[in-house]
Image (cartoon, grey):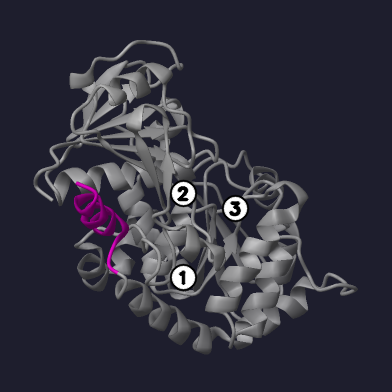
Amino acid sequence: MMKFRRLDLFCRVVDNYGDIGICWRLAKQLVREHGLAVTLYVDDLASFKRICPPVAEGAELQQVDGVTVRHWRDQDGSYMPHEVADIVIEFFAVDIPPGYIEAMKQCEPRPVWFNLEGLTAEEWVEGCHRLTSPQPGGLIKHFFFPGFTGKTGGLLREAGLEQERLQFAPAAFLSQLGLTPAEIASTRISLFCYPHAPVSALFEAWQTASQPMTCLVPEGVAADTVRSFTGGDGRAGTVATHGALTVRVLPFVPQPDYDKLLWACDLNFVRGEDSFVRAQWAGKPFIWHIYPQDENLHHKKLRAFLQRYAGALPGLADFSLRWNGAPSQGEAEDWAASWAALEAEAAAATVRAAEWQQQMLSLGDLASNMLVFAATLR
């Protein structure tokens, strides 16, 4: 694998933080753990800065955590063969600039070219993982799919992540975020979701809970509902309690602190792909808000995952479907009953989360699996 020295990763930000979140984790890992010189081409530096504060929004070219970051403004420009990396990754079927592809054709040997696809639990992925796609000029693109089985590329994970999690002390971290001792002692839930999530209905159900609950919401998430509940502007530091429920607004934290937030909570609501994967490494029960697609294709993807993960947890499966607007036919919305069913499974869900995490650990990690496969292509 050491024959590879350089890697270029092309990322367009579609889902505000998921796309850049995944690509940024991958880029850093390839530098730190595999010694590659990585250039990350990204079109949206503002979203990038939210999860990585050192990023300079106005910079065309910058070094961040050992990664060269280029502002990818358009498809124009000419490139020379010496500018092409040994491995080229297009994330989620972005179009690499035509000039870059022309330069790839002039390289000898040709670069290893991956289309790193989005994560899904659907069975067809196993048949498409590592498939080739011949391109003009003698180039060959390979599809590489993350996934949940040994016939996929596995999930993105840094080598030291699990050891760091096991050594983590949640109380000190939560105190730094402003939580009171009573909030730390309560049932803690992190909430990260898309704007269309039925958060207000859930808040109503939580207010009548039998035990105190604290919901930790990053600034800007579920903004209208949070402002209505708290009576404030929804900025970081805002906190309010109604009935059993306390809602506290947190600053939008960098990626390493978001991992700690997941570790520190009893239940995590996550969205998209990046936080969805991190919730699985947290080893805690979670509810996934999947990125919406036309014709409700995302419901099919959600059911495929729940079939693998939640077969013995009908309450969790039902709640997840409702949260994503896909309840069983003919059922009325009853969030109090749905939450009660989920809560009744809390112990079993905690056991399942730990089992699933170990299962995913056994698959290796996506970055290492990709480089092992790349070596076979040379």
Residue 253 visible, this orientation: no
Q: Would you say the residues marked 1 and 3 are in contact, meaning their CB atoms lie under 8 Å apart?
A: no
Q: Residues within 10 Å of mark 2 (few under 14, many from 20)?
A: some
Q: Secondary structure at mark 2?
A: loop
Q: Amino acid at mark 1?
A: Ala
**Does the magenta portion include 376?**
yes
Residue 150 visible, this orientation: yes
Q: Earlier in the sequence, mark 1 or mark 2?
A: 2
Image coordinates for residue 193, horizontal then vertical, percent: 59, 53
Image coordinates for residue 124, horizontal then vertical, percent: 55, 64
Dot label at residue 182 = 1
User: Disc 1 and disc 3: Cα gap in Å?
Assistant: 25 Å
Q: Is residue 352 left or right of residue 366?
A: right
Dot label at residue 117 = 2
The prevailing secondary structure element of the residues shown in magenta is helix
Q: Earlier in the sequence, mark 1 or mark 3?
A: 1
Q: Earlier in the sequence, mark 3 or mark 2?
A: 2
**Does the magenta portion include 142?**
no
Q: Secondary structure at mark 1?
A: helix
Q: Range of the magenta residues?
A: 364-378
Image coordinates for residue 221, horizontal then vertical, percent: 58, 46
Dot label at residue 193 = 3
Q: Amino acid at mark 3?
A: Cys
Residue at image position (43%, 60%) is 277
Q: Of the residues tagged 3 and 2, which is closer to the observer?
A: 2
Image coordinates for residue 297, horizontal then vertical, percent: 70, 55
Query: Residue 77 or 42: which is nearer the viewer?
Result: 77
